[in-house]
Image (cartoon, rainbow, N blue to C red):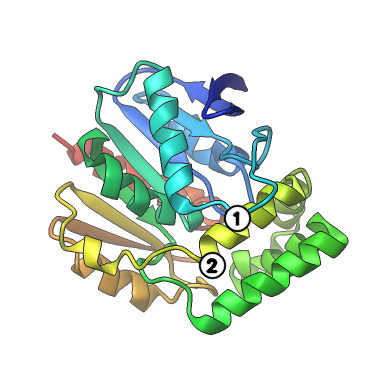
Amino acid sequence: MHHVEINGFRMAYRDEGSGPVVLLAHAFPLAALMWNPQIEVLRYNYRVLAPDLRGFGQSKGAPLDRYATVEEYADDLAAFLQKLGLDREKVVFIGLSMGGYIAFAFYRKYAQLVRALVLCDTRSEPDTEQARQNRFKLIEDLRERGMEAAVEANLPKLLSAENYVQREDLVADLSRTIYLNDPAGTIAATGALAHRPDSTPLLAEIAVPTLVIHGKDDQLIPVESARQMAQAIPDWQLSVVPRAGHLSNLENPVFFNQALETFLKELK
């Protein structure tokens, strides 16, 4: 991992390959590790940047006295690109779940830096009131029990029901990744997710090619929600990943990577 000082904290990131820049924003409550199957393929034709977001993985610096915001994560990524001398180069922004929420925030503020969007297993709507209350309950549990609470609350739903039972290796890898995270960073991010804005009005304003990728068996966000989101974007494509849930990039990486590479090759 490389490290760079931005916005008052030390961001850890992977920087692989050369060519057009692809920026990967990971899901909650994981880290850049989740993108390994994509990095191994994309690095042959692209410069792939995969940071640990603030408070996750090896990146510290989460606010301790308040919740974070999705806008702050977007600002961190813009500062990160500037630090690497890429603030005048358009990137392909790929975000999964929480990374997708950050992609919306990034596009709202830094559209001039975006060449294309890839929105994976995410949604444009804010949390429902019930979902928000569930997040506040998780925050209480995180304060009491640490990352064990995050594993229990999230892991069974991150994969399809079938993969959660059958893919013991993947379940173990994800559990390790979650446990390595800092409870303070996870609490700050949980608050950011609970209070994120409605990005649905933004969809019609997205003026770059956009690929929506979604696991067919996503337990957290129905695939029909992804279809409706995609159809609201002017220049959209939709790829539904079979035999995959919320972490479609890990559950069926061969299909996911093929859809992603096809989209990237079509970009002008």
Give the percent coordinates (x, y) of residue 51: 53, 33
Q: Amino acid at mark 1?
A: Tyr
**Label 1 sits on residue:** 67
Which of 3/211 is in front? 3
Q: Residue at the location (18% across, 38% down)?
A: 267
Q: Which mark is residue 194?
A: 2
Q: Position of residue 36 (x, y in %)?
A: 56, 37
Q: What is the CA distance from the residue labelled 1 to the residue labelled 2?
A: 10 Å
Question: What percent of the width, then of the height, locates residue 248?
Answer: 49, 58
Residue 162 in the image: state x and y as whole percent. 63, 72
The structure residue drawn at horizontal position 24% and vertical position 42%, both measured from the top left corner, is 116
Q: Are marks 1 and 2 in contact (CB under 8 Å)?
A: yes
Residue 264 visible somewhere in the drawing:
yes
Mark 2 Cα shell of 10 Å, populated few (<14), some (14-19), many (≥20): many
8 relative to 181, above or below: above
Name the secondary structure under disc 1: loop
Q: Earlier in the sequence, mark 1 or mark 2?
A: 1
Q: State which quarter of the image contains the C terminus.
A: top left
Q: Is residue 183 left or right of residue 234?
A: right
Q: Is residue 187 above or below residue 257?
A: below
Name the residue: 54% across, 75% down.
219
